[in-house]
Image (spheres, coloured by chain):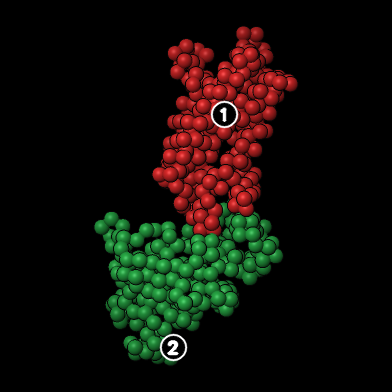
Chain colours: A green, B red
Amino acid sequence: MISVSMKNVGKSFGANKVLKDVSLETHEGEIFGMLGPSGAGKTTIINILTKQLAIDSGSIHVAAESREIGLLLEHDGLYPRLSCIDNLIVFEDIYGSPRAKTKEMLERVGLKDAANTPVHQLSKGMRQRLGLARAVLHEPKILFLDEPTSALDPVTARGIHRLIYDLRAKGSTVFLTTHNMEEATTLCERVVLLHKGTIIEQGEPKEICERHNAVKTVMDLEAVFVKLTGEGLL
Amino acid sequence: MNSIKAIFKKQLKDTYKNMVVLIQFFLFPVVAWVMTEMVAKSDENIPNTMFVTMMAAIFAGMGLIPLVASIIAEDRERKSLRFLVMAGVKSGAYLLGVGSVILLVSILPAFAFSFIAGYAGREFWLFTAVIMSGVAASILIGATVGIVSKNQQAATGLAMPIAMVLGFGPMIAPFNETVARIFHPFYTMQFTVVVESTYTYAWQPFAIIWANVAVLTVLFIIAYAVKGLRG
């Protein structure tokens, strides 16, 4: 069953055309990755799919109500003066989630000891983990994650990956953007490569790498991207 | 209802932890008390209620308008509103939650003003009710400014001139009849009027304040319909 779809979507900011004829589909219970350098249009796609931005042309479909969606963005929207637990309690109250779930989430993202620390005292990585805990608190149908592990150390990132796998196992669709090739290759079942607002390749990571002879000792999606665009991902 | 309760709790905790905001609620009653004790009570020509009404007008007008505007603009600027809207919080519920906290916390300074003025019984409750009605009007102005402003800086830039006019108008009014006439329909002026009328015609200031509230509600609804609250 299709969870998210975009058909021939175009979007411009003034004269700057940021998305050109973008079409993609994700399926229920799938971990879907979007790869591309800064300015490729990844965040714009998330903003469109979460109805923060209107499209100029084409059509979109998201098979979830807004409160069935989980969201982690670069601007985390956390309340800096409130503690980690209080930030989650706001959403616990809105969703009607049990308190035990909130505490469990803090533990799962490794913030149990920082539960009473005000958010303004947290590092960027800790804020990111708290944002993720908030995004998954209500076990969303669709989870949009914008660079979910960009500020995290490898051990914490693996913990986050486990959390994403668990959500997928419960039937959630995960739609993530990343710069991290290894993350995309190991975590995502399907990916799209986005370059200057255009999808240049899509499919399973292995299939894409094989198509472009980029399977060495490990699958190398970055090599595919460089081959197709002549540019690096960072 | 869950949403209103959640926003109310959030705002109460946030207000309690925000010294800059918290100080606004206590600064004006303290200044009113100091001026009443040190100036009004030592000069027979100055009524004991003068500084209280002056500070109450400044509190409701100058203090609360930028405060409410900046709370909403801050939530919008740091994208917190986006997450609330995604979670299904309706804009009306958000504004009701924030407004209720400001209204609730304002009861303390309103009581303090009435106490400093030396009111008791009916007069005490009447003056407190007038201030609280003014607070409701200021919350509406602050919310309107918060809605139409892109960020906190813009909100402060827009709120300050409005607040200064509404706050300083009643201060100048006792010294200039024209100013008093111009400001008579404004709610902040009614704090002085209710004191001067010695409560014989207490319904009039209330009528004017609630007429202000009605007009401001219409302005707020228009701003809300045009701009919305999306982060």
Residue occupying the point 47% across, 31% down: B215
Identify the chain of the residue marked 1, using the numbered disc in the image. Answer: B
Mark 1 falls on what kind of element?
A: helix
Tag 2: amino acid? Val
Q: Is residue A166 above or below residue B66?
A: below
- Assess disc 2: are there few (<14), some (14-19) or many (≥20) residues with their C-alpha within 10 Å of its C-alpha: few
Q: Quadrant of the C terminus of chain A?
A: bottom left
Q: Residue beneath label 1, please? A: B134
Residue occupying the point 46% across, 72% down: A3
Residue occupying the point 56% across, 23% down: B207
Identify the chain of the residue marked 2, using the numbered disc in the image. Answer: A
Specify the quadrant of the image occupied by residue A140.
bottom right
Q: Picture coordinates of residue B195 (x, y %)?
A: 62, 17
Q: Is residue A12 visible?
A: yes
Q: Residue beneath label 2, please? A: A218
Front-most of B39 and A227?
A: A227
Discs 2 and 1 share one subunit: no
Front-most of B4 and A74?
A: B4
Tag 1: amino acid? Gly
Cα distance between the residues tagged 2 and 1: 69 Å
